[in-house]
Every structure is written in C-alpha cells, then in structure tokens.
C-alpha cells in the first residue's frame, strides 16, 4: 500500500548538469518514491529508476501542457515527479508548474508540492573554470519566445553598465540563430573588449567543451543549444592554469 | 599509500544550505579522500568525516589567510579540502582561493585544483517558496566590507529598474546593521510597494523561518546573518498554498 503521505504529491526535481554525482541525495530519494515521472524525453530516459515508475516523456517545448498533466495526475491521488535539468527553479519547470497551478482548477490546490533544488548550469560552468561568479552577477535568458527582444537588450545594457557578471541562458538555437550575436554586439558598446567570455557546452558530460575568449574575439557560432555563456565584468580576471584553459575568477573586492 | 593522483590537490567543496541530503555525491566522495580540511569552524565540525582527516577550523573572517594555508599545504604534497556553505563559487571561498593563487608563489601553480558546485542559498530559498527565480534575476552581496556602498546602491537601482528579481546575500550583521534597511529604502523609490519580498532564515535547517511580505511592509530587523533576502520584480506573483506561507513565483513570460 502506498503511504498516505505520498498521495496527491508533486515533486519538482532538479537533475543538475547531467551526471549522477551531481544529483543531490534528496532528489535521488524522491525519484525512488514517485509512481509517475514527467520530463523531456532524453533527460528521464537516462535516469536509473525502479521498474515500477511510469515514464511520461515529452518534447522540450510542451512545458505548460506537461505541468498541467502532472498536476492533474497528482490531484487524482498519485505521487508524481516532474524533472528539469539544472535547477528546476531557474528558467525551468518550477515556474511553469506554479503558472499552471494558478490558472488551474481548485482541486489542484490540494496537491502537496515540493521543489527540490539542483546544480544550475551557471554553477556547474563556474566550478569548471574557477570562480567567475565570485562577485555580483545576473542571469538572463536570451529566449525571445518568452519576452520581447527589446527587454532583453535593456537588461543586458543595464547589468553590464552596473558592473555585474552576466550568465546567459538559452543563448542560441536553430529557431533563435541571431540573438547571441546581437547580444555580444550590444555588449561591445558597453564593456571593454578585453572582458573574459566563457562559452561552455555540455559541462560535466563526455562531450564537454569549454572555450575562454574575450568580448572582442568571441563569435556566436561557438555556442550551441547545450551551451551556457558567461560574460565577465571589467573586474573579472584570467590566470594561468595547467589545464587546457586558464582559470577565470571575479575578485570579491572592489577598491574604493 | 596515497595514490599519486591525490597528491598536490586542492578540492574547493560546496556544502549547500546545511543538510546532508543537499550535498552532492561528488562532494561527499571528495570529503572522504582529503587528508586535511579547512573551513569555518561550525561548518566543518558538523560533517561526518573519516577519523583520518585533520580539521583546520577557522573564524569566518579569515578567508584569504585560510586560502593561502590550504594552497601551501596542497603544494607540499597533500590532498586538501576547503569548504564553503552554499555554493563555493558564489560570494564564497572559490574566488578567495584564486585570488590567493594569483598573488602567491609560483609553486602553488603545480597544485591541481577542482571546484565542486553546490546548492547556493538563493536556490535553496527559491525551492522552499516556489519559483521566485523563474525569470531573469541578479545576485548582489550587501557587504560593504568588500566594495563601496555607492556601488551597491547603483547596482540595486539598475537591476530593479531593468526588471530583474534580486537575491541579496549577506544582508545584515552586527557589524553591518543599516545596509539592508537602506537597500529597502532605495528600492522603494524604484519599485512598486506591492512587489513580494522573501526573508528566509536558516533554510533547510531545524530553525528555518521564512516570511513572505511586500516592499512597503518589510522591515530589515526581520533578517539576521543567517538570512537570504529575495526582492521580487513587478511580475512576481504570490498564490495561495496550504503551507504556512503562500507560493511565490516569477512567470517565464513577459507579454509584448
């Protein structure tokens, strides 16, 4: 018998960058307790799960539909998981689930929801190259499916002018080929050409590729849809390393 | 015999918000491999470690000194860990270690350094209240030990005006009693009084306390040095929950 504490439950689960050693024990435990699991097909198919779990793989563009299905199934009395790569709370499924909850039928409010955090892409990338997020920073999604491009440009300029390091999520895709190049062009009017740029693709996976360059040199085609881009501030430094790439870090101090 | 792969190594280890279930298996593994461990006393004393590990607890203000000691010991041939709560890369030890490395003797560059990411405070807080970081956001440290206060004010205003959600690290302490109140006062000139504010203290620990309020109502004395503060954007919403506090989320969409 399923314990009643597991009925009408929805776990929103963060899978981190894609390596088991970077998934928290909290999430591993929840994955072993759910009866049904929703998520983007490639993510949920690579998890090792009990045979009893029913998988509901979906396309990566069907997020709101997926959130509604998961809430509906949980409200029917099941213990359901929804997974995101990275951290579910950052440009991912958690916000979508709450949006669905807000607009959905009253009985969905009886579902016990728990969000479980994870290693977001910018944390993973930062760890691989040193400490570029060691001081004030912003995270911006470059996807203009979800907001008008002029808002994105305004935010890039405001953040760069104020001295924040920038983490750029969803930098480029087949459907959005020009936005990253345009963002670099915009930033070249605001920041020195020497600021370090990190283009990190598929971090912590076998095909990991990381390039450290500068704003004047960077080319948007070095990124793909598996990439995260970090744009340094004028304070961000590179220092020699015996790795293939230098270390990048942003000092804690700004002198008066 | 210690395997040679573990000699001259420095692991920079993220402990997350303070619960074992939120420390990644990668960090747990590294903790079992080091010979020496540096960190703020209360953090390293609560870890369950092999008896063979030598602890080097320190005061929380001695960060650069601690980083130098750790690099020096690793360069002498040992396998050393340095721990941070949250994510070591965000306002924490990783940046300090690279600062020490940059300024230190040449032979420190022979040390193999690995940074291991973790659940930063803002990710933990976001998960506990819903998805306030579901859209573009900034992280700002309010500590003016490390940068002049006018830079902090400028960043608060720039980020709020551009529509970012704000995560405020190091909001208040005995030595810095007025900065958080001043930050709220500054933000009241830029943002509507209705934007949601989260004051989250000691999340995922037994003494966890979370308060959801608004910019017009919030008082700085509700925070202490264990708190993280999240200031919503004008798009951030609260919705009813059967928890003690409402859900808070920031939608993915901004309409044109």
Image (cartoon, coloured by chain):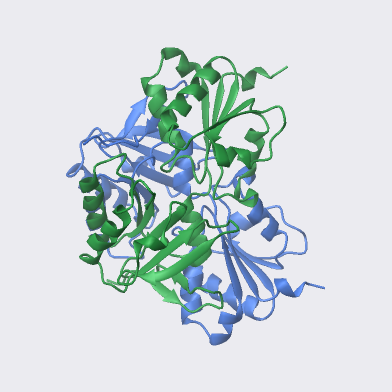
Chain colours: A blue, B green
Q: Position of residue A125 (x, y in %)?
A: 46, 41
Above or below, A72 relative to B81: below
Above or below, A128 relative to A180: above
Left/right placement of residue A136 relative to residue B8 reads left
Taking depth in this image into account, of A150 and A14 the one nearest to the observer is: A14
Q: Position of residue B179 (x, y in %)?
A: 29, 53
Taking depth in this image into account, of A180 and B151 the one nearest to the observer is: B151
Return the residue found at the far bottom: A106
Taking depth in this image into account, of B110 and B84 the one nearest to the observer is: B84
> Which quarter of the image is occupied by the C terminus of chain A?
top left
Return the residue found at the far front: B174
Q: Is residue A240 visible?
A: no
Return the residue found at the far right: A1
Left/right placement of residue B97 relative to residue B191 reads right
Taking depth in this image into account, of B18 and A8 the one nearest to the observer is: B18
Above or below, A220 relative to B107: below
The quarter of the displayed image where residue A31 is located: bottom right
The quarter of the displayed image where residue A232 is located: top left
How many numbered dots are placed on residues in this image? 0
Residue occupying image coordinates x 32% and y 30% = A237
The quarter of the displayed image where residue A189 is located: top left
Q: Position of residue B68 (x, y in %)?
A: 45, 23
Q: Is residue B85 visible?
A: yes
Q: Position of residue A245 (x, y in %)?
A: 42, 27
> Which quarter of the image is occupied by the N terminus of chain A?
bottom right
């Amino acid at each position: 018998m399923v314990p009643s504490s597991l009925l009408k439950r929805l776990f929103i689960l963060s899978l981190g960058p894609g390596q088991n050693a970077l998934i928290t024990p909290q999430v591993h435990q929840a994955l072993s307790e759910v009866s049904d699991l929703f998520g983007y097909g490639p993510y949920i198919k690579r998890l090792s799960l009990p045979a009893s779990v029913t998988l509901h793989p979906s396309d990566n563009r069907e997020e709101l539909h997926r959130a509604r299905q998961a809430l509906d199934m949980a409200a029917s009395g099941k213990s359901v998981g929804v997974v995101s790569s990275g951290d579910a709370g950052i440009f991912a499924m958690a916000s979508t689930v709450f949006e669905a909850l807000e607009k959905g039928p009253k009985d969905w409010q009886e579902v016990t929801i728990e969000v479980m955090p994870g290693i977001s892409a910018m944390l993973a990338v930062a760890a691989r190259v040193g400490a570029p997020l060691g001081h004030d920073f912003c995270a911006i999604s470059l996807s203009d499916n979800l907001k008008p491009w002029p808002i994105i440009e305004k935010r890039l300029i405001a953040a760069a002018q104020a001295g924040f390091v920038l983490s750029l999520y969803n930098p480029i895709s087949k459907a959005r080929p020009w936005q990253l190049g345009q963002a670099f062009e915009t930033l070249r009017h605001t920041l020195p050409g020497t600021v370090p740029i990190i283009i990190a693709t598929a971090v912590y996976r076998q095909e990991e590729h990381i390039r450290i360059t500068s704003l004047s040199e960077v080319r948007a085609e070095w990124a793909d849809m598996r990439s995260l881009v970090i744009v340094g501030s004028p304070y961000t430094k590179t220092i020699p390393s015996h790795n293939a790439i230098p270390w990048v870090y942003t000092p804690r101090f700004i002198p008066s």
